[in-house]
Every structure is written in C-alpha cells, then in structure tokens.
C-alpha cells in the first residue's frame, strides 16, 4: 500500500478511476507520508556520509523496519561503500 502512495501515480481505470485515484493520492495525510519518507531518506543519507567520514564504516540498525524501502534508496546511493544494516520486524516473512 505504501509503495503505491510513494509512487504517487494515479492508476485507476478510465477517466473517473484516475480522478478518484488522484483525489485519494492528493489527500494531505498521504502527502505528509511522502514528505516523511523523503525527509527520513535525506537525513539518513546525511548521517551515513558523516559516519563514513569519521569511522569509514556504517552499520544501521532498525528494530521496526517493515519492508525498509527507505533503506533501499540509501543503499543505492552508497553502493560499493562499507554500509550495512540489520533490520528487525514482527513479520519476518517476505524478506
């Protein structure tokens, strides 16, 4: 569900379906969710850069990660660098 919200592209059928999707996606609550994800990703990238300069290695621990899509964005930027993560969640399936 959140992947659909983050993608932010109406996918309804016909004009009316796309209009309903657009209204749904433009709800202020979903706009805030997208802003939160963007802020989290930007701050995490800044923190990783800082730690890499100080320690030459970064290890991230998230004890309630869910699918951790934000970390995939961070790892994409630091591909090939010593950045790793340990993720935990109640639902251990799906990873």
Image (cartoon, grey):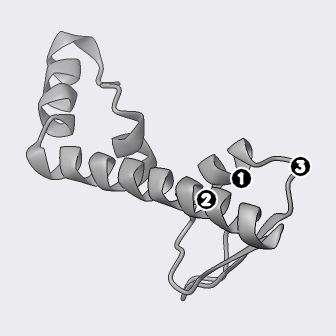
Q: Residue at x 20, y 51 (%)?
A: 32
Q: In the rendering, at what x and y percent does residue 81 appear?
A: 85, 54
Within-10-Å neighbours for mark 3: few <14, some 14–19, many 20+: few
Image height check: is 16 above or below 26? above
Q: Residue furthest top?
A: 15
Residue at 29 percent of width and 24 percent of height? 12
Report the Cα–Cα distance between label 2 and label 3: 15 Å
- Determine contact: label 2, label 1, CB under 8 Å: yes
Among numbered discs 2 and 3, the one appearing first in the sequence? 2
Q: Which mark is residue 15?
A: none
- The residue singled out by tag 2 in the image is 71
If you read the primary sequence from the N terminus, does the residue marked by circle 3 or circle 1 appear first? 1
The numbered mark at residue 80 is 3
Marks 2,3: beta carbons within 8 A: no
- Quadrant occupied by the C terminus: bottom right
Asked whether, in this view, residue 46 is left or right of residue 1, the answer is right
Residue at 37% in and 53% down: 39
> As drawn, is 30 to the left or to the right of 82?
left
**Residue 36: x percent and y percent?**
31, 56
Relative to residue 40, is residue 86 depicted above or below?
A: below
Between 51 and 11, the residue placed more toward the observer is 51
Image quadrant where residue 94 sits: bottom right
Residue annotated with mark 1: 75
The secondary structure type at the circle numbered 3 is loop
Give the secondary structure at mark 2. helix
């Amino acid at each position: 569900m959140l992947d659909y919200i983050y993608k932010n592209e109406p996918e309804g059928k016909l004009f009316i379906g796309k209009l309903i999707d657009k209204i749904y996606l433009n709800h202020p609550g979903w706009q805030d969710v997208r802003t939160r994800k963007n802020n989290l990703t930007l701050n995490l990238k800044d923190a990783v850069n800082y730690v890499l300069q100080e320690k030459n290695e970064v290890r991230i621990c998230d004890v309630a990660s869910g699918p951790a899509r934000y970390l995939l964005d961070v790892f994409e930027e630091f591909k090939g660098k010593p950045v790793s993560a340990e993720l935990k969640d109640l639902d251990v399936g799906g990873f």
